[in-house]
Amino acid sequence: MAKLKRSALLHYLQNPNQGDADQYFLLGRDIEDGSVSLNPDMDKTKNILDEVSINDKGYEPEYDVDTYYANPSDGWIYEWLKEIALNRLTGDDCMTKIVEVLADKTTGPYDAWREDVIVKPQSYGGPQGGVTIPFNIGFCGNREQGNASLSGKTLGTFSTGSIPSSDD
């Protein structure tokens, strides 16, 4: 078994103003390192008997997109990031969902997770070469495990519950 290529882990942001049809933006273009930082939150204490105890408080995951180049042809994601950054939007105006898909087998459906996220641009402008709007994605909870179908790298559907794979 060969190691997974990085392209097997896909992250899609859902259009928060989508109406009836799901619209997703695949993160990846212009990104050379796309990692979800789990940021584990733990306290470790050592008592006078040299015993160690750990208080595991969970995770505070985030995904930093440092190289988003403002591109009007990206459609809703460009318009949304522009609106958040230039109008300094906060709260619910910055909320959406992320769908993470692990395409680790030859055919789908694939294991997937969906979660509420907040998207916060960190700056706008950048050096010569293109306007950038780097942004952070903060994971907010309500994580659901499910399955996703793909058509190439386009996300088809996400559904919770068990769907038999074609490998079974």
Image (tube, grey):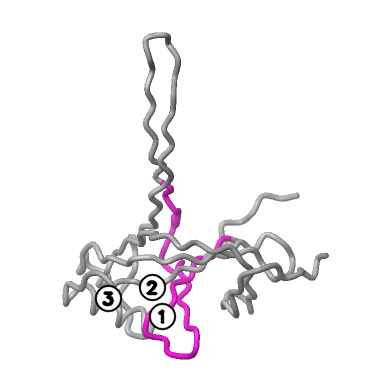
Residue 86 located within the stretch drawn in magenta: no
Q: Secondary structure at mark 2?
A: strand
Q: Secondary structure at mark 3?
A: helix
Contact between marks 2 and 1 (CB within 8 A): the answer is: yes
Q: Quadrant of the C terminus?
A: bottom right
Please tell me which residue lies in front, 142 or 23.
142
Residue pointed to by mark 2: 96
Residue 13 located within the stretch drawn in magenta: yes
Q: Is residue 110 left or right of residue 71?
A: right
- How far apart are the alpha carbons under marks 1 and 3? 12 Å
Can you tell which quarter of the image residue 123 is in?
bottom left
Residue pointed to by mark 3: 93
Q: Amino acid at mark 3?
A: Asp
Residue at 48% from the left image edge and 72% from the top image edge:
26
Contact between marks 3 and 2 (CB within 8 A): the answer is: no
Contact between marks 1 and 3 (CB within 8 A): the answer is: no
Residue at 43% from the left image edge and 48% from the top image edge:
38
Residue pointed to by mark 1: 15
